[in-house]
Amino acid sequence: MRRDQRAFLWDVREAALAVQSFTEGLGASDYAAHEMAQAAVERKFEVIGEALNQLSKLDAALAQRIPELPQIVAFRNQLIHGYAGVKPETVWHVSQHSLPELLAAVQHLIHELDAGADPNS
């Protein structure tokens, strides 16, 4: 049985909201000094990247509407496989500057799907 594309979008939304919650009230230096926050945020970025990777296999047209999708999946791969040792500053920057745009796009697509609109048009 194929998984509904909304499930992948929901996974992305929930993980993005968790990242925002985990970093709320922290500055870049606080985050860099907080190993548990780093681990939690990195794990949620792994979930985001994997969900979007699976979405791209299930519904490529819908996935193309996600801004920077290839870079998000590549970021997940870097985190998982330790390529180039992703620094806390990089993860912090992504969480503060790229994640809000991703979250907005995903919430918009979820709304379209829930409303019965064709998200590929």
Image (tube, rainbow, N blue to C red):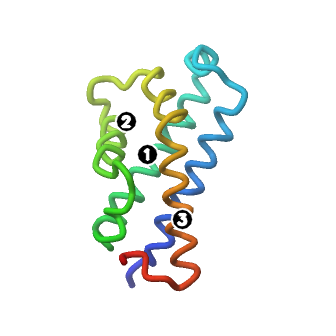
Label 3 vs label 2: CA separation?
Answer: 27 Å
Task: Report the residue at 57% width, 37% height from top.
Answer: 40
Q: Secondary structure at mark 3?
A: helix
Tell me the mark number nearer the camera, choosing from 1 and 3: 3
Identify which residue, 111 or 44, lies in the foreground. Answer: 111
Nearer to us in this view, 6 or 47: 6
**Classed neighbour count for the residue bearing mark 1: other residues with Cα under 10 Å, few (<14), some (14–19), many (≥20):** many
Using a 10 Å C-alpha cutoff, classify the residue at mark 3 as few (fewer than 14 neighbours), some (14 to 19) or many (20 or more): few
Residue type at mark 3 is His
Kindly identify which residue carries mark 1: 46
Left or right, residue 109 beside residue 27: left
Name the amino acid type tagged 2. Answer: Leu
Q: Earlier in the sequence, mark 1 or mark 2?
A: 1
In this rendering, the answer to whether 13 lies above or below 114 is above
In the picture, the disc for residue 108 is 3
Q: Which mark is residue 79?
A: 2
| Quadrant into which the N terminus falls | bottom left
Quarter of image, res 5: bottom left
